[in-house]
């Protein structure tokens, strides 16, 4: 017999044996009758004076739980019909895995390096401030998520698809806790090996994965895809191409624009990455001077609407680090990540505001790329303000609110270094104005959030793509080109690891459907 129950437990009883005892008491049965306890869902409720866990359990009474290990079933696709997948991020890799399941041969090409060799380029940008435009925090095996966190939270309503993505990650080595936690997280220290396991499965079953392989042209004839050109020197032919290049592959947008392929402006967001001491965020969120050993480093999610537009937190990283995520030498970009234990002394989060089409009117001459031009201008301006290095503009939070330059700056997790700069000197007025309004609202919800012990770093500019590559809602093909499948973040149809993975899977399914 199976029973699903919901219980509340104090942090020190967040273990299976304690849950088993509480379940037996709740169901009024002898504890020996409970053979298995499975955690279905788990979240922290910190709204009251003492935080506690809300847990949904599946209890197996007088019977053993059936084996639930999810194992993908792959076909040998060595001689199957090919599909080219451009980009080895979450969308590209999950598209490759889905292709194995459905009997297509994935040919994955990525401009960057594999996870092992990519580490050298990350070290170069952190220690020597040298940006490799082909291999960095954004480009390479696993995409941006590999070395910048691995948070798996999504607002996607396709719950079945979400479960499949999480189960697939578990099958390749992720901890089973991601199946139950309300905000699952793998961690930058663990995700690379999972990515490698996925790649090796693709190759073992007849697919191909090629690194240091940059798509330099799309081969199109009579409105149909024929293949791609790589590294300007050779061609790969296929009737279907999934474009999963991510939102930082700006050369792809420029390539499509030159080829007169339809593109659209897409609203996006821009702002700063704010960093607090983690102990401060814990104290605010848990209503206690010290977190204690049984609670994880706390996070937050904030959103408000000013009279003009929305302001919201993005990619919050408890116990995290701010990373240099530029993809070209003459720009600076921030992002954040956390290791699996989230045990660094700082908490950071993007705080961004909407950028609408009217905000980029100065770049109207660029057509659909006007938002991209706006992004580039801000990133270069911040690079110049930081001394034309990977040092980034920074300002203490209260100094920013009170319109004064910081005379000194606190310690930061950002390794290349920070430079005291007034944000009003690098951002347009509407961004500064709305960020200030947003911070005032956030202080009302998190008393103590506004402090000069916090420092803001600029810019947080790659929250999403400023360009959409339009596709048919039914077929997922580009609205003009048969066989071209714009996919995930780079095409403007997803945001984050899980939703990008789902979109990659869906593109493969549509290829099968469209070619029946």
Image (cartoon, rainbow, N blue to C red):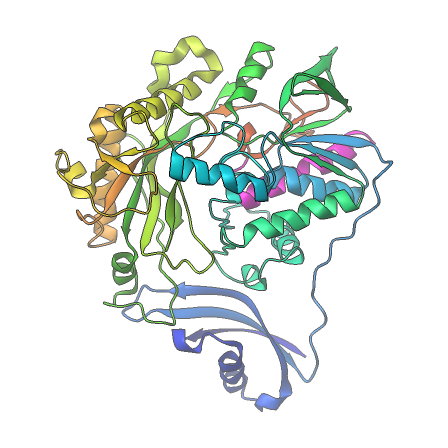
Above or below, comparing residue 31 to residue 483 in the picture:
below
What is the x, y in percent for residue 66? Answer: 72, 72
* Residue 410 visible at all: yes
- Figure quadrant of the N terminus: bottom right
Above or below, comparing residue 356 to residue 140 in the picture:
above
Bounds of the magenta span? Answer: 494-516
Q: Is residue 384 left or right of residue 475?
A: left
Q: Is residue 62 left or right of residue 48?
A: right
Find out whether residue 498 is within the magenta segment: yes
Find out whether residue 168 is within the magenta segment: no
The residue drawn where x is 70% and y is 21% is 228
Name the foreground residue: 455 vs 40.
455
What is the x, y in percent for residue 281? Answer: 28, 57
The residue drawn where x is 25% and y is 58% is 280
What is the x, y in percent for residue 71? Answer: 73, 58
- Figure quadrant of the C terminus: top right
Above or below, comparing residue 104 to residue 374 in the picture:
below
The residue drawn where x is 58% and y is 23% is 470
């Amino acid at each position: 017999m199976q029973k699903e129950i919901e219980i509340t437990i104090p942090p020190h009883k967040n273990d299976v044996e304690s849950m088993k005892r509480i379940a037996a008491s709740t169901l009024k049965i002898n504890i020996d009758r409970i053979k298995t306890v499975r955690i279905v869902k788990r979240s922290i409720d910190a709204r009251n004076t003492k935080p506690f866990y809300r847990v949904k359990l599946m209890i197996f009474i007088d019977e053993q739980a059936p084996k639930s290990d999810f194992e993908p079933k792959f076909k040998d696709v060595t001689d199957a019909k090919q599909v080219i997948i451009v980009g080895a991020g979450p969308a590209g890799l999950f598209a490759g895995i889905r292709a194995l399941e459905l009997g297509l041969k994935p040919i994955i090409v990525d401009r960057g390096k594999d996870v092992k060799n990519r580490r050298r380029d990350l070290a170069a940008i952190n220690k020597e401030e040298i940006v490799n435009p082909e291999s960095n925090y954004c480009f390479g095996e696993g995409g941006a998520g590999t070395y910048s966190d691995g948070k798996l939270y999504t607002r996607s309503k396709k719950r079945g698809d979400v479960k499949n993505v999480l189960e697939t990650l578990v099958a390749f080595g992720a901890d089973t806790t991601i199946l139950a936690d309300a905000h699952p997280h793998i961690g930058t220290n663990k995700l690379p090996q999972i990515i490698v396991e996925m790649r090796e499965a693709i190759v073992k079953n007849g697919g191909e994965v090629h690194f240091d392989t940059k798509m330099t042209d799309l081969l199109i004839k009579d409105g149909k895809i024929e293949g791609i050109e790589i590294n300007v020197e050779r061609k790969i032919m296929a009737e279907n191409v999934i474009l999963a290049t991510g939102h930082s592959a700006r050369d792809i947008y420029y390539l499509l624009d030159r080829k007169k392929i339809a593109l659209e402006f897409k609203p996006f967001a821009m702002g700063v990455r704010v960093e607090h001491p983690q102990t401060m965020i814990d104290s605010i969120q848990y209503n206690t001077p010290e977190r204690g050993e049984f609670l994880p480093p706390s996070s937050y999610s904030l959103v408000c609407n000013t009279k003009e537009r929305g302001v919201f937190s993005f990619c919050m990283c408890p116990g995290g680090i701010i990373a240099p995520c530029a993809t070209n030498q003459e720009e600076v970009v921030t992002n954040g990540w956390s290791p699996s234990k989230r045990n660094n002394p700082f908490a950071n989060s993007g705080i961004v505001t909407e950028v609408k089409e009217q905000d980029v009117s100065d770049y109207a001459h660029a057509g659909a790329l006007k938002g991209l031009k706006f992004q580039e201008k801000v990133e270069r301006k911040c690079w110049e303000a930081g001394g034309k290095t990977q040092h980034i503009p920074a300002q203490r939070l209260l100094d920013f609110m009170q319109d004064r330059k910081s005379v000194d700056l606190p310690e930061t997790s950002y390794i290349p270094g920070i430079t005291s700069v007034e944000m009003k000197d690098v951002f347009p007025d509407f961004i500064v104005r709305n960020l200030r309004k947003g911070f005032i609202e956030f202080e009302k919800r998190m008393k103590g959030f506004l402090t000069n012990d916090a420092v803001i770093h600029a810019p947080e500019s790659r929250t999403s793509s400023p360009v959409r590559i339009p596709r048919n809602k039914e077929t997922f093909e580009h609205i003009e080109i048969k066989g071209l499948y714009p996919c995930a973040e780079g095409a403007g149809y997803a945001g984050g690891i899980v939703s990008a993975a789902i979109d990659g899977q869906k593109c493969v399914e549509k290829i099968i459907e469209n070619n029946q």
